[in-house]
């Protein structure tokens, strides 16, 4: 299986195959390395990728989202199966979706479908834990759809607004 | 006051403080009943209590703050006392009165003492009469410019003009120079009128580079008032305490002694009973201090006082509420070693401390010598969105400050919270700051610039985290596809295992 | 001895003590490297270390006890010191010498001191010369009946005859009456010859209803020896300590002082450096005491000493091993409050304490004020079959014994171990015994009769446990049949959730 | 579904049906009670069976074996689906199997197939954690088969010996 893994600013294409009790792993088309290790408890892994590259890390996955705790560092990103992703793009979704990072309640919606917006323009304000969080346009474009209304409760990962890039 | 032994306590709170109070009740041999909102049905305090009652939907205003429902829960479950924790109804004198009227013991100060300390103006008057130093300035609003000039000159510049009806920074003006006073007063009045429909403004001395130092007091119903020394709570982010320690790195013994006596006087002046905290501003000369307010309940950061005095403040509250006299005098109390508290919040330190509630896929608290975690969560549970995003308080003791900090750093590294970012990395950055390490800080220490300079979003140091994420995904895909993964519940279930019986009964 | 700062320590042990040592290393700013057997690949000490090396299969004799492999692991991972923990190689002078020969620092006493205390006869001679009281009797085997009569009369009946080559109760005879001495000596000799091919027998005073009280000592390489007071370890089951406390409920200050001085003398007599423990028998008059042996390593029950003195013994070991002088003198040390330790074992108290290793399906350690758990496991892990079945040590401090015990009882009730029975209920039964509560106990306290009378197999008090078991099974059956259960990993995976990014990159 | 539940000395036949977010439960053919509650963490349950019968308990299941922690009390037993049990008996197994409670190593086997044994007679000795544990005949009978040999490692739950009752 091939996965596109993104953690922090680092992006890699990682190939994983089962190999007895371990795995054969290749990062960005590099040499295949044998990784041994095991799952420990709910989120723990102890992995040995050879050449002294071995230690305990914790991994939580939720959908395509990944949270890796390496020591005290929370590394966040995603693990994508490009085959699924290709299907999704073919379906037309995905490009400019602005999504929440946490559950909350929509306080204000500041744009409507069809509006032109500039990069950084506030689209929607969501309150969570007594704090207002502004969700801004990641790029200039046109609002394709608004998926929420003021007063509505939203789950983590909910799509708030879909944007079409200005230059698309 | 007569003795009134307790048997069953309603804990009118949630999260770590509810858990803390339940523990105290159990140690005193009392049963504890939890209340919970629908959002907290899976909370740790519910699991730990002897009984639990749902008091409404997620919003606090519809559950934890509804006096009638809390009282009904106490009566329905046969409780004879109510402990309010902190926050929620803990400083609500009306609630305290309702508890007493229902024939239950209120584990807190007399309602009159809550009222006396709750009104800023009344408290200032009472405490001045008791020779408690308050920030120099006027108690009543300024009449005119002449009065403003006279008083400002008297207390010395810089001064702060404040809207009497104010809050949230509106109607406040800092004045450094007498020449600017008139313009500032006009502006403050105008802003106050616009914001609060009331242009009353008063003037106070501006205490610059102050530290926030507070004194824990404990009083019984028999007239004894003692203090349990100070806590330095000057490490604040946006006026919220995030780290506390005791002793304060800068308090001289004679200042500590004076501050403790003042706190006891303040408590006595309002007929205080139970545990309470007098907050002070300590000027940058580390000698002058001014009373700010008294918190008439248990304080979030009470554990560090417990660690250096050995006194369990919750058990003390329970005994005092039952009418027992304090079992120690001021002279019996000592401050041994050094204790620190790190408030571990579900907040992302790499994203402006944005709240990060959510599920705790993995969770393991640090342990070992002189490490204590007052938490309200467990592995597989979650930090709900609706309340204060506190995960737990990490409390660490050492023989001295250096030992306490090196131990706390170890404990922070031992602390595994998997699934949501927390403020843990922030504390490690704080501990690395030479000024902090030397105890040189004040309430303005944690500026946005400091945070930006000390918290760089972590990046993978090598390929291992990426490989781990890919392998975890690979194993999940395999498991969902029906292949046997290395370890899952299902495979464990299938493994034959028996531990209960020596042999099976013949069929 | 010159200073030799350490940077990276190999921890040559497993389980809770390996975790404890790793924590101490991290607090001192040192890295820690774990070793593990194949059976311990998932152990907590492996997860917590900075690096970990597998040293062989499950059997200790093929892994944790193989000197060459442990040394190789230390050298391969760039360690400059070895901490042996307790058990395994910790009192193996040969190993200590090999460590030093390999150019590594041995975190323990000089090998000669291990040897001197390891030989019972040599230790008795050395310590008598140092005026350390040992149990009255002969050092050398008895020559004949006349000598036996003379010495027995001298030390007073009852006496115990013991095979010099003995162990395990073989060749031992209790003699209460001088008239029985001859027959007993003949029988003991005969049994000793049969068991050990050596009929040498010696005679010792029988100390009846004795308590086991031990003194913690700490010595640096610069000639300073201090003691850190006593631990009372008299609550034993089949000669194994299960509960310890400090201070001892029966030790008068002058006896404590005398015992402490004797322990320091014993340590000095063998040139001791590091942490060690002198074990004594305390006679039922609570005044006479006799040296039993010195354990030349960290003791299982060291945490209770840490709780009352504030001294971190592992950090002290690390500093002493690096050549640093002790940073306190005898006069600086105080015993504050009371601490107890409950050894929580994977043993079934309702089935004769049969070992009950196995998976920890659910696991939550108690927390809160003055509660400490030194453990080596985590939820989802297991207690392996191959080693000591210890789950963790529950250590609790209180201002006095009563507070420590009431707090420990609370912590025991907070402690959730799900999947295997543990000794937790035993301690609650112990705490309920009025004699124990009054501190009236000796090493023979926990008789089989006591255990039978105080531990009745628990039965469901109502229908809820049965309903819970049925519902859990029902939900498992539903999940396996493919229906969506309320909470599983799989459903959590399917829930869309994102916390990482503010927005997705445009495709 | 109907289950035979045994915990300690208590045996009950319990009927469980799903009912919205809860269950309908009947114990030993008694009145049907509505039980609400939820799973919490790895083994936790908070159940409310009405009439004040509500609290947190922990349940671990492994095969048919059940471990319930109620306060500090470890309650051990089994939850059996009688339908599975009927199948198993029809297949001829199950009756007099002597099994281990913990992993260990077989030290001695003191009987052979065909031996007559009396109730309480030691059949096999297994060592675990430095302690020897004797496994005894639960009733008088004849050894149908011996499933282990001295020196062999055994898993928890392993069948050591199968006995035919004397009066069967």
Image (spheres, coloured by chain):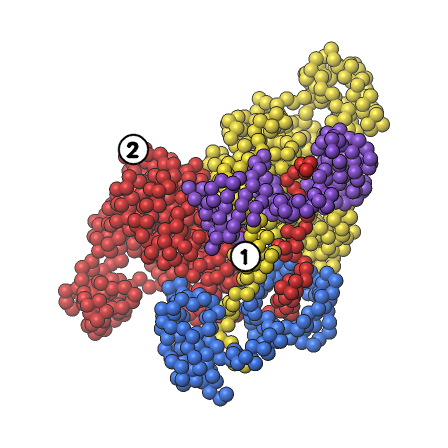
Chain colours: A blue, B red, C yellow, D purple
Q: Is residue D98 above or below residue B448?
A: above
> Could you tell me how far apart the alpha carbons at marks 2 and 1 are, in whole angstroms?
54 Å
**Disc marking residue C163:** none
Q: Residue furthest right?
A: C197
Measuring from the top left, give residue C269's x and y in whole percent: 68, 35
Give the residue drawn at x 82%, y 27%.
Answer: C195
Q: Residue at x 82, y 35 (%)?
A: D114
SS at mark 2?
A: loop
**Quadrant location of the C terminus of chain B?**
top right
Please say if D6 is above or below B233: above
Which residue is located at x 74 percent, y 59 percent? C76
Query: Depth-wise, is mark 2 or mark 1 nearer the camera?
Result: 1
Please report, as a chain letter, where disc 2 is located: B
Residue bearing the label numbered 2: B2
Whether residue B72 appears in this view of the structure is yes
Q: Position of residue C179 (x, y in %)?
A: 73, 11
Of all chains, the one bearing label 1 is C
- Give residue C485's mark: 1
Q: Secondary structure at mark 1?
A: loop
x and y, in percent, of residue C159 in the image: 70, 19
Q: Is disc 2 in the same subunit as disc 1?
A: no
Counting labels gives 2
User: 10 Å neighbourhood of mark 2: few (<14), some, or many (≥20)?
Assistant: few
């Amino acid at each position: 299986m091939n996965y596109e893994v993104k953690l922090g600013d680092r992006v890699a294409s990682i190939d994983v195959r089962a190999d007895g009790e371990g795995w054969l792993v290749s990062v960005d088309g590099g040499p295949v390395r044998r990784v041994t290790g095991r799952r420990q408890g709910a989120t723990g892994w102890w992995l040995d990728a050879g050449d002294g590259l071995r230690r305990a890390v914790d991994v939580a996955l939720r959908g395509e989202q990944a949270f890796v705790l390496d020591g005290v560092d929370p590394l966040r990103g995603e693990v994508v199966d490009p085959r699924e992703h290709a299907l999704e793009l073919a379906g037309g979704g995905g490009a400019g979706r602005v999504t929440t990072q946490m559950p909350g309640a929509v306080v204000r919606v500041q744009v409507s479908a069809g509006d032109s917006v500039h990069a950084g323009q506030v689209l929607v304000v969501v309150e969570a834990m007594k704090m207002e969080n502004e969700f801004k346009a990641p790029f200039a474009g046109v609002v394709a759809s608004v998926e929420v209304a003021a007063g509505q409760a939203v789950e983590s990962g909910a799509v708030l607004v879909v944007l079409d890039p200005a230059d698309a | 006051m007569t003795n009134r032994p307790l048997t069953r306590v309603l804990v009118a709170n949630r999260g770590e403080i509810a858990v803390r109070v339940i523990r105290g009740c159990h140690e005193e041999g009392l049963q504890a009943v939890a209340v919970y909102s629908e959002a907290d049905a899976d909370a740790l305090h519910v699991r730990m209590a002897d009984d639990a009652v749902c008091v409404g939907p997620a919003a606090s205003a519809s559950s934890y703050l509804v006096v009638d429902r809390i009282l009904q829960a106490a009566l329905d479950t046969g409780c004879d006392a109510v402990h309010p924790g902190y926050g929620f109804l803990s400083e609500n004198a009306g609630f305290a009165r309702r508890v007493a009227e229902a024939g239950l013991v209120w584990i807190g100060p007399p309602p009159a003492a809550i009222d006396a300390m709750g009104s800023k103006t009344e408290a200032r008057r009472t405490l001045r009469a008791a020779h408690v130093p308050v920030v120099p300035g006027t108690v009543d609003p300024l009449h005119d410019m002449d009065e403003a000039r006279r008083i400002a000159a008297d207390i010395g510049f810089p001064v702060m003009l404040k809207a009497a009806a104010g809050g949230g920074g509106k109607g406040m003006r800092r004045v450094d120079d007498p020449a600017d006073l008139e313009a500032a007063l006009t502006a403050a009045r105008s802003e106050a009128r616009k914001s609060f429909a009331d242009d009353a403004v008063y003037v106070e001395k501006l205490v610059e580079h102050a530290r926030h130092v507070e004194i824990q007091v404990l009083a019984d119903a028999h007239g004894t008032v003692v203090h349990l020394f100070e806590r330095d709570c000057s490490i604040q982010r946006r006026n919220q305490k995030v780290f506390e320690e005791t002793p304060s790195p800068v308090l001289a013994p004679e200042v500590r002694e004076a501050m403790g006596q003042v706190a006891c006087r303040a408590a006595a002046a309002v007929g205080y009973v139970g545990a309470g905290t007098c907050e002070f501003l300590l000027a940058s000369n580390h000698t002058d201090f001014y009373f700010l307010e008294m918190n008439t309940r248990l304080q979030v950061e009470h554990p560090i006082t417990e660690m250096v005095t050995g006194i369990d403040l919750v058990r003390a509250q329970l005994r005092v509420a039952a009418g027992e006299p304090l079992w120690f005098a001021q002279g019996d109390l000592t401050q041994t070693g050094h204790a620190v508290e790190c408030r571990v919040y579900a907040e992302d330190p790499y994203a402006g401390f944005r709240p990060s509630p959510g599920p705790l896929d993995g969770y393991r608290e640090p342990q070992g010598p002189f490490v204590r975690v007052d938490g309200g969560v467990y592995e597989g549970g979650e930090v709900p969105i609706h309340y204060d995003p506190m995960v737990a308080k990490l409390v660490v003791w050492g023989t001295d400050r250096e030992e306490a900090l090196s131990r706390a750093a170890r404990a922070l590294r031992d602390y595994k919270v998997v699934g949501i970012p927390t403020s843990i990395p922030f504390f490690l950055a704080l501990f690395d700051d030479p000024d902090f390490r030397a105890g040189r800080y004040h309430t303005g220490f944690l500026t946005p610039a400091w945070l930006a300079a000390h918290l760089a979003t972590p990046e993978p140091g090598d390929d291992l985290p990426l490989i781990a994420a890919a392998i975890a995904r690979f194993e999940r895909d395999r498991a969902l596809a029906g292949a046997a993964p290395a370890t899952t519940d299902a495979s464990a279930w299938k493994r034959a295992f028996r531990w209960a019986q020596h042999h099976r009964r013949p069929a």
